[in-house]
Structures are given as structure tokens and as C-alpha cells.
Amino acid sequence: SLKKTYAKRAETVKHPLSLYLYKLMDLKASNLCLSADVATARELLWIADKVGPSIVVLKTHYDMVSGWDFHPEHGTGARLAALARKHGFLIFEDRKFGDIGNTVELQYTSGSARIIDWAHIVNVNMVPGKASVTSLANAAARWLERYPYEVRTSVTVGTPLRDEDTDDEGASGLSPNPNAKDIEGGSNDKASEGRKGSIVSVTTVTQQYEPAHSPRFGRGIAEEGEQLFAGVEEPPLERGLLILAQMSSQGNFMNAEYTKACVEAAREHKEFVMGFISQESLNSEEEDDFIHMTPGCQLPPEDDDMAEVKGDGKGQQYNTPQKIIGIAGADIVIVGRGILKAGDPEHEAERYRSAAWKAYTERVR
Ligand code: UP6
């Protein structure tokens, strides 16, 4: 199954959000997740907009971000959700829930952050037992049911906008530009071949909802005039979970037996569990199609590609995209400081995207 393309997997996968993600990956020629570990909400929104075209998932740790605005309609979560619609990526809050079922449920759905409202994906540290997975699954199902009226947005796609036109922050009165170009990945770059998709502006949006409920952010609701990534539909409302089955850190306690229990829990909750945070592919049974996202990823510096990638001196261990995707068989690389600490994060994100995509194309060839 390591030979199967993302497009092929999209044809059979059951989880609606995984289906959406596979489509995005295929369309953007990207299997890159940015771990947006920045200090302020301002930087978070800035980096999400800059790196958005190169990634399919944006990973957050909302609790390390200062100035996070909790306002449901125009706070940080809402603004991230709008950027996710504009560039075509999913938001993954790396909360690593790890408590009794009742507590994780409340941490997921309540409090100031109301994570479930803006994060398409969350993850769980299953140390307290499988009940934490069941509870999060139930919470997500209830959340979905609370909006049975379904906000239907019908989007008439307008003229594609040029990339440059979207740079300006306050540019919501964007002038449609007929000379639109596709999001490019460098024309002489082999790994970016076949990338499609561009940003368009929404011209018509119809929303219907019961008067008792106001439309909430984070549920893929676009507004008139908003910029949208064209090529795939908006993400489904279903939420997804990743189980933390293996860690990248030195001397961690997640042994083989623990990892096996994580796979079992995933198989028991296929309607909610999309896959794993792991260091390798854990799909074994014929029908398994879990998605694997792997942190602990860096490339050697551009000017010294023979340099070894090691750790950060604080327990983190790094592997290259080639090793993670090509050899270990994971699907998405998660990169934080490798991109964030670079002089030009936008350029560096493209370098990681291209390397990880190359490892994938070589694997499925
Ligand atoms: N992360 C790991 N290893 C794991 C699980 N999660 O590093 O096993 C998370 C960290 C951080 C990111 O919390 O947000 O992935 C890695 O960042 P880095 O690329 O800067 O090391």
C-alpha cells in the first residue's frame, strides 16, 4: 500500500476529512505540514498566509501563542480558518489531549479556546487509555449534530486573482485579475510538476441557517468577497483525530505494545480517527488506510547538503523527508524550526515541500 498514490487513496478512504486532505495533497503537490510554533498571534497569521501555498496542514500550539484572540467570529481561530480557505490547508491543533475522557471532552469543546470550532484536526496522547479517544469521538459527533441545519454555501467562483494581489493585508476589495497565474512551484522544479490551483474571489455565497443559530467560524463558511482556494470544495464539517502513537523525542516511553494499542483504538473509531502521529507507517491490515504525519524533520542546509541532521540538544531528533516519506512510509512531514528559523521561510517551505514531494513520487513510482 506504500505504492498507492494519494489520488488513488482518495477514491476509497472512508473518513471525509482524509478524503479532502488526499485531494488537497494531490492538487497542491504537497505533503508538508508547517508546525507554526511562533510566539504571537500576529506572527502566526503572517506565516500562515506566507507559507499557505506550500502546505496542506498548518499545525498550531495555540497555548504557546500570546495575544490569541478568542472572539468566535473575528478572533485568531476565525482568521486562521479564513486563511485555510484561501490557501487550501487544514488546521491541526497539536493539543495532545491526555486526561480522563470527561476532561478531554471539555478541553476539546469548551473554555475560551473552543478548539473544536476552528481546528479541523486534533490529536490525543492515549496514555490514560482508549476512553479518551471514545470521548473525543462522541464530543465531535455531538458538535456536528448541534448544527443539523447545515450551512450550505454555494460558491460561484470568480476570476482567479494573481498571487501579488493577495499580498496586501487589507485588500479585501480585490480586483479580479485576468492575468491570473497558477500557484507556482518554480518551473524547473521537477517535484512541483502537476501543481494546480489558484486563489479566486467568491462572488456569490448563499447561506441558510436556522435563526436560532448564528453561523460559526471554522466550519468552512465563506463570506461574500472572501478569497477562496479553487480546485477542491470547502472542507467537510466532520472533525478528525490523530493518535499520538510514536514520538520523535529521544528516550520516549511509547513502546511497541503502546503503539499497537493506538492502532487498535484507531480501527475501533474509523469514523473519527484519520490516522497517527508516528515515525513510520502503521497500516498493516489490508483495509487500513490511516494517514501518518511525522514530526522531527529537517533538511541539511541548502549550501551544505552533506551535513548531517541531528537533534536540537533538547531531546528532539530529526530525520530527512527522504527517510520519513521514502523509507519509513509516512505521508506528511511536519516541519517547525527547519522552516521558521530560516532567513526566508517562504523559500524554505518550498524547499521542504519539494523534497518531501520528491520522496513521495519516488516511493509510489
Ligand atoms: N512534536 C514533535 N515530536 C512528536 C510529537 N510532536 O516534535 O513526537 C511537535 C512539537 C513541535 C513540532 O511539539 O511543535 O512537532 C516539531 O517542531 P520542530 O520541527 O521545530 O522540531
Image (cartoon, rainbow, N blue to C red):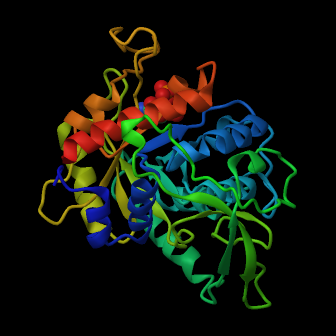
* Nearer to the camera, 58 or 216: 58
Quarter of the N terminus within the rendering: bottom left
Whether residue 4 can be seen here: yes
Furthest residue toward front: 179
Q: Is residue 2 rendered to the left or right of residue 224?
A: left
User: Left of 94 or right of it: where is 113?
Assistant: right
Number of numbered tags placed on the structure image: 0
Left or right: where does residue 154 sit relative to residue 356? right
* Viewer-proximal residue among 165 and 321: 165
- Whole-percent x, y for residue 207 in the image: 73, 84
Which quadrant of the figure has residue 279?
Answer: top left
Residue at x 44% of width, y 66% of height: 20
Kindly indicate the quadrant of the structure image that contains residue 306. Answer: top left
Q: Is residue 253 visible?
A: no
In this view, 10 is above or below 259: below
User: Above or below — where is 308 with respect to 213?
Assistant: above
Q: Position of residue 365 (x, y in %)?
A: 18, 46
The x, y position of residue 309, in whole percent, is 36, 15
**Position in image of residue 255 (x %, y %):** 22, 35
At x 50% / y 66%, what residue is drawn?
Answer: 239
Residue nearest the observer in this picture, 81 or 77:
81
Residue 230, located in which quarter of the rendered image? bottom right
